[in-house]
Image (tube, helix red, strand yellow):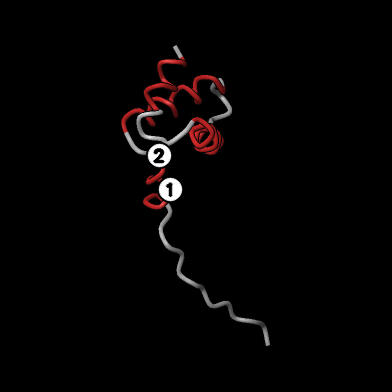
Amino acid sequence: MRSDLVFGALNHVANRYQLCQLASKATRKLHKPSTRLQDTTNEVLGRFQTTNPGTLGSLSAPAAQPVERRRAA
């Protein structure tokens, strides 16, 4: 049940508001159009049970190097 997933995810997140914010962002990024949104949300909450979602954002996004763009003369 989803309540079990939520309570399991709360072990790694400080409060429910933060959990909702992180889960909605992760669900938007991981959702595939051919699947149900509820299944994607359950998958995200399942992942939050095993890892700390607050640290995932800094690890998955590598620092972007500034790129110089040439202008036409």
| Residue 71 sits above or below residue 24 on the image | below
Q: Position of residue 9 (x, y in %)?
A: 39, 27
Question: Residue 32, located in which quarter of the rendered image?
Answer: top right
Callout 1 touching callout 2 (CB < 8 Å): yes
> Horizontally, is 47 left or right of 66 in the view?
left
**Whole-Å distance between the Cαs marked 1 and 2?**
7 Å
> Horizontally, is 6 left or right of 32 in the view?
left
Amino acid at dot 1: Gly
In the picture, the disc for residue 53 is 2
| Residue 31 sits above or below residue 62 on the image | above
Of all residues shown, which one is farthest toward the front? Answer: 15
Residue 30 seen in this snapshot? no
Give me the residue at 31% from left, 30% from top.
Answer: 50
Q: How many marks?
A: 2
Of all residues shown, which one is farthest toward the bottom? Answer: 73
> Horizontally, is 51 left or right of 30 in the view?
left
In the picture, the disc for residue 49 is none
Give me the residue at 42% from left, 36% from top.
Answer: 14
Q: How packed is label 1: few (under 14 Cα within 10 Å), some, or many (20 or more)?
A: few
- What secondary structure is marked by label 1? helix
Of all residues shown, which one is farthest toward the right? Answer: 73
Q: Position of residue 53 (x, y in %)?
A: 40, 39
71 or 43, which is in the foreground? Answer: 43
Q: Position of residue 66 (x, y in %)?
A: 49, 72
Of all residues shown, which one is farthest toward the top? Answer: 1
Give me the residue at 37% from left, 51% from top.
Answer: 59
- What secondary structure is marked by label 2? helix
Amino acid at dot 2: Pro
Name the residue beneath numbered marker 1: 57
